[in-house]
Image (cartoon, grey):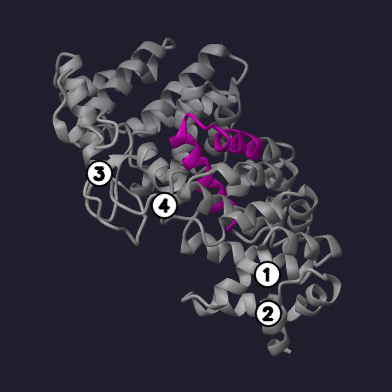
Amino acid sequence: MDYPPHFRCPISMEVMKDPVTISTGVTYERRNIEKWFFTYKMKTCPATMQTLHDFHLTPNITLKRLILAWQHDECQPPPPSVEHDELTSLIHIIDSSPFKLRSLRKLRSVINTGGDAIKILFMQCQGVAVLVQIVLQGLIDSFDFDAFRACEEALGVLHHLPVSENQEMFQLLSEADSMKSISLVLQKGGAEARYYAVTIFKKMAKADYDCNWELVMNEHQGVDFFKSLLELVSDHIFTEASSSALEVLIKILGEPKKTVQLKAIEAGAVSILIELLPESNRSKSEKILLIIKLLCQCPEGRSGFVEHGLGIAAVTKKLLRVSDIATKIGVKIFWLICKFHPTEWVLDEMLVSGSVRKLLGLLHMDRTSSTKQKVFMILKLHGNTWRRNYTCFPCELKDYLGRLN
């Protein structure tokens, strides 16, 4: 297939699947430019060789849509136009027939390829309410294979719709039984269905409306819910699902409710995230560090972080190497550990892993005042211990900590 040149990544010359734009305005395939920056440690734009100071990657959503639309137009005949009466008829069949799967698949194809006008028309025809009823039936008849498959297909349609922008749709999906049913698919559905579920949850998390996430936290369901999200986070292949799961975790754990944090910790969140952190790219590292910080705000989270053994080293590796955001969050994690959990092993590990040296380096760099203040307080709290207990304590740190006192 003869693709237009601007659809190809300048590095690999392959058609881009996840195009991102860097500060020079050039667009690359995400995995290629991340490897260029973070694996090969290059500081230039591959196409222009211009030296970079900002390594932020911005998703090029418009180009991605153009590529997908072009691929669809080239590979398939154009879909037939869908008029109001035809769409209404399809919705009626789905609502009234006990055999819904074929019609739901057809509807998903129509919504996916029909553009914004079809989505608006579908919502005006009360199609969302019909699909939500199918989703609810999946919870009631969760052991019925056909009902559960219909629920998965209904989510496949809903995940294409602007949940975060439509208050009526958001309210239908944020009701207790709706959220429980979506959560059930997240835990027990197929790979595609789990992606649909987590995408819907991500859109709900980004909405301006309130959502009670504790509705999926009853009894053991909350732990299973977090385990399912963490499984998606650990998926190195399906990156979109992984990113969506991280955003859902950030939203849920950002609400100051200890019972929710405890369920995430019980699901193994601290350990899993620490182990994922070292090999994660910039965006994923920032999100993982933020979740670890949120979990470390409670004693159980701090204990889990320390008991893992690699937590301090993993966070230290990201300081001053990933981004200002990652460094800022990493310092907050160390402040929480040093303030509330300063065991002898913690202080020893911070010195051995290079945390103390990096913290000192931050004081001499142009960072936010709040970050500098936390570094200062950490050194003020434990500088004497590091200087007194370790004969190999670096001389420059001895001199600086001496001035602090």
- Mark 2 crowd level (few <14, some 14–19, many ≥20, 10 Å Cα): some
- Disc 2 residue type (three-letter): Met
Q: Which residue is mark 3?
A: 27
Q: For marks 1 and 3, give the CA distance.
A: 38 Å
Q: Is residue 29 left or right of residue 380?
A: left
Please tell me whether the stretch drawn in magenta is mainly helix, strand or loop: helix
Which residue appears at 41% of the width and 13% of the height?
101
> Reading the chain from its start, which is encountered first: label 3 or label 2?
3
Residue 374 visible? The answer is yes
- Disc 1 residue type (three-letter): Trp
Q: Quadrant of the C terminus?
A: bottom right
The question of residue 382 being in magenta is answered with no
Residue 79 visible? The answer is no
> Reading the chain from its start, which is encountered first: label 3 or label 4?
3
- Mark 3 crowd level (few <14, some 14–19, many ≥20, 10 Å Cα): many
Q: Which residue is mark 1?
A: 335
Label 4 with label 2: CB-CB less than 8 Å: no
Q: Secondary structure at mark 2?
A: helix
Which residue appears at 46% of the width and 49% of the height?
283
Q: Which residue is mark 2?
A: 377
